[in-house]
Image (tube, rainbow, N blue to C red):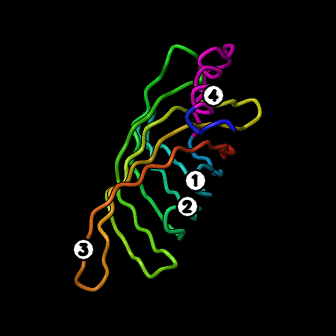
Amino acid sequence: MISNRNILLILAFTFALSGNMLSQQYKSAIGLKVGNMAVVEFKSFFNDHLAIDISSGIYLVEYPGIFTNVVFQYHHDLKTENLRWFYGAGIGTRYSRIERHEIGIAGSVGMEFSVPEVSLAFSIGFQPTIFIEFIEVNQQFFLTGPATFGVKYLLN
């Protein structure tokens, strides 16, 4: 079985070797991401580099439950046209089916390759989040960090 790490490495290598395309940035997009979670994602750019990424979905492992993250991302161009890497931070919340409610600091780092001709963007990323767990008087910190693969439809 191929691990998430191997999939990410293969995709990163594929993106780096992709042919040149017309350089065009999009304003907003909506899509899906998968990893150890299933996510609906909306991304919108404020300018050429700064974007807001709103993700909501379900964790499939580790205390399955629903979550929402709001992350501000900064995007940098790479040498291959339409390939960018990004990083960012924001807030996240999660509620699991075993009565756990958590709030935390969400991060984001990854790469995105857009194909304007077909209105699609593909991404690979890592979303570390440090949660504070609230259960009565017991408060606990823990880190989760799913690797994801995403496909977005470019809205404009």
Q: In the image shown, does 68 or 120 lie closer to the viewer? A: 68
SS class of the residue under badge 4?
Answer: helix
- The amino acid beneath tag 1 is Asn
| Mark before the other along the chain sequence, 3 or 4 | 4
Residue 140 in the image, given as x and y percentages of width and height:
26, 69
| Figure disc tally | 4
Residue visible at 31% across and 81% down?
Answer: 135
Tell me the magenta residue range: 6-26
Q: CA distance from mark 1 to mark 3?
A: 25 Å
Residue at the far bottom: name it: 136
According to the picture, the residue beneath numbered tag 3 turns out to be 139
Residue at the far right: name it: 118
- The amino acid beneath tag 4 is Leu
According to the picture, the residue beneath numbered tag 1 turns out to be 36
Q: Taking 43 as reference, is 68 above or below it? A: below
According to the picture, the residue beneath numbered tag 2 turns out to be 61
Q: CA distance from mark 2 to mark 4?
A: 23 Å
Mark 4 is surrounded, within 10 Å at the Cα level, by few (under 14), some (14 to 19) or many (20 or more) other residues, namely some
Labels 1, 4: front one? 1
| Mark before the other along the chain sequence, 2 or 4 | 4
- The amino acid beneath tag 2 is Val
Q: Taking 76 as reference, is 56 above or below it? A: below
SS class of the residue under badge 1?
Answer: loop
- The amino acid beneath tag 3 is Gln
Residue visible at 48% across and 64% down?
Answer: 68
Q: CA distance from mark 1 to mark 4?
A: 17 Å
According to the picture, the residue beneath numbered tag 4 turns out to be 11
Labels 3, 4: front one? 3
